[in-house]
Amino acid sequence: MALSKRQRAHAIRAGQYGLLVVVVAALVLTADWEQVRKAFFNTEIAAAMFPNVITVALKNTILYTALGFAFGLALGLVLALMRLSSVAPYRWIAIVYIEVFRGVPALLVFIAIYYGVPIAFQIQFDPLSTVMLALGGVGAAYMAETIRAGIQAVPKGQIEAARSLGMSSARATVTIVIPQAFRIILPPLTNELILLTKDSSLIYILGLFREQYELTKFGRETLSRSPSLTPILIAGLCYLIITLPLGHLSRYLEKRTGGKKISTPESTGLGVSA
């Protein structure tokens, strides 16, 4: 007897649940839980990491991320406006910047700023300035495209209405278009903040003092003196303290903005076009 469409759907769903139960049961039965406890849940090592993991590592991670995001947002806005400019050289500069910094690993940007700039320009940046410029420089390339998409998502009638009231194009952009664009792009900007939080770990290449450690560097240093992987687990949990609230904030903002989606190169898989 042939199954109906609804019956087939129920059968497929039941099969998926059954497969999930089998996989979970296999993991539970085959794992050596005593070794797992020793490897990841050593309470003595975890206790020894406090309070420094909070007062130093977590604090520095938040500071590095905030500096990178603030610089990247400001630069991204400038690049987005250049990308939409009627002046061709501005568009070309923005396109080249976005393509280069989206295509180059962030690690290379850190190395270039901290080690390359002093050779070329005799300017030495401290780690705080380096992480701001490197994180912000890479983040700006992505945020510029998000901001550009947000600006283009604002109805053209808004600009026409502002111009009909005697506003200049620049004033209409600053007072009408950009505020509405940011309301649209807040969820993807929050996701970019999460990515920058994780990329802040790249500061480890700069040779930091202990009071400059962020979570990954702090976890690695503790791990080198520990027979357990507990330091990595603690560092990961501290990252979740930052990223989980940001994830909830992103979903909340998406609901507040009506779940409106914008098309960016990251969401469509397309590059920047001239």
Image (cartoon, grey):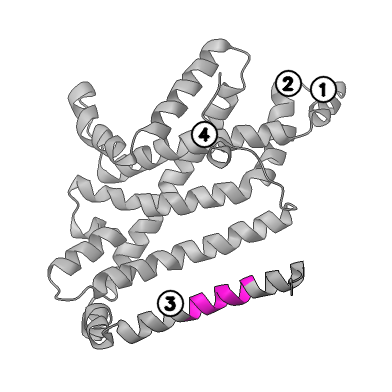
**C-alpha separation, residue under disc 2 versus residue under disc 4:** 20 Å
The quarter of the image holding the C terminus is top right
| Residue located beneath label 2 in the image | 169
Residue 247 position (above or below residue 206): below
**C-alpha separation, residue under disc 1 versus residue under disc 3:** 62 Å
The image position of residue 127, as x and y in percent, is: 26, 45
Tell me if 2 is positioned left or right of 81 in this view.
Answer: right
| Residue located beneath label 4 in the image | 76
- Secondary structure under badge 3? helix
| Residue located beneath label 3 in the image | 23
**C-alpha separation, residue under disc 2 versus residue under disc 1:** 7 Å
Residue 187 position (above or below residue 18): above
Q: Earlier in the sequence, mark 2 or mark 4?
A: 4
View extreme (front): residue: 1
- Secondary structure under badge 2? helix
| Residue located beneath label 1 in the image | 163
* Residue contact between numbered discs 2 and 4, judged by CB atoms under 8 Å: no
Quarter residue 152 falls in: top right
Report the span colored magenta: 12-21
Q: Earlier in the sequence, mark 4 or mark 1?
A: 4
